[in-house]
Amino acid sequence: MGRAVRDRGSKPKNHTVKVAVTGATGFIGRHVLAELEARSIETIALVRHPTAALDGLSRCKTFQLDLHMTPSNAFELMGSPDALIHLAWAGLPNYQSLHHFEQELPAHYRFLKNLIKSGLQSLIVAGTCLEYGMRSGPMSEDMEPQPGTPYGFAKDTLRRQLGFLNAFHPFQLTWARLFYLYGEGQAKSSLFPQLRAAVERGDEVFNMSGGEQLRDYLPVTEVAELLVALTLRNEGSGIVNLCSGNPVSVRQLVEGWIKEYNWSISLNLGHYPYPDYEPMAFWGAREKLDSLLEPK
């Protein structure tokens, strides 16, 4: 869906866009790398471990980097990319841990500031819908964030820090607020992998919450397309919801998966309580995203 978007920046026509990706071996990162490969984009995958396998990506190079210990010349060492898609963030899925603002937040700001001061022109950061806090209904980008978790607070604070930094060292910033994702490579503790594992074990029932909470889900492949499309715009888009815009109940979602894959398993609804860190019904407003994806 994002393939109609074209780079409208000021680079010369013979310039080859170079994109770096943090969190490259993670759930979203692997799909982003595949999307960049499909578009023949030169890519630098930033990995913590040199043995990380990135098979089938001929246009992708790897660079070992621990962003908690970033060398001062990291930008040059990684090949001076035109853009960075920043997906890395440790400590998940424990959204309530103080680790997010005690350790992750300062490390990520130092890392990104280092790259920007060294010449990085375009930055696309994965934010989170938890920045909106305990509010119900459609969430739009012009709402004032009210994060109620350490994770949401840390992400929102990083966005604000980058906004202040931009006044001193101008760069293009896109803050992509992610809602709910599913697909291949997701953590085993996530809903879809848990359901599939229960089916593979031959379980007769699947324990879950009441399932009446409304959420906004997208397949991870589509999220990867959107992230790359926004990157190739070569324009700072500010805050953008990466969402479907269509609320769906968790129960309806799970029942849809069971039907799609022709699985035989019953749902034990109400076995788990609803999470206390998110409202019962919220989803993303998609108007800004759709307007950005319109070809010009």
Image (tube, rainbow, N blue to C red):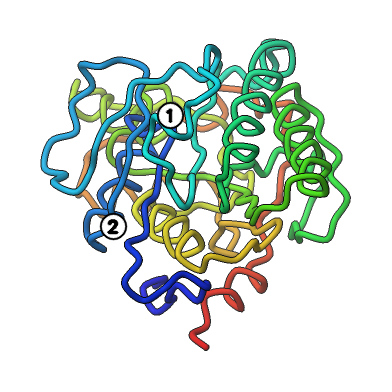
Q: Residue 102's quadrant in the figure?
A: top right
User: At label 2, which amino acid type do we have?
Assistant: Ile
Number of callouts in the render?
2
163 on left or right of 15? right
User: How far is mark 1 from mark 2, CA to CA?
Assistant: 31 Å
Tell whether label 2 touches label 1 (CB within 8 Å): no
Dot 1 falls on a residue whose secondary structure is loop
Question: Label 2: few (<14), some or many (≥20) within 10 Å?
Answer: some
- Residue for point 13% across, 36% down: 55
Q: Which is nearer the N-term, disc 1 or disc 2?
A: 2
Closer-to-camera residue (14/132): 14
Which residue position holds label 1? 190
Above-or-below relation of 209 to 220: above
27 on left or right of 271? left
Closer-to-camera residue (38/61): 61
User: At label 1, which amino acid type do we have?
Assistant: Ser
- Residue for point 74% across, 27% down: 154
Viewport quadrant of the N terminus? bottom left
Q: Residue 37's quadrant in the figure?
A: bottom left
Name the disc covering residue 291, or none.
Answer: none
Which residue position holds label 2? 41
43 on left or right of 253? left
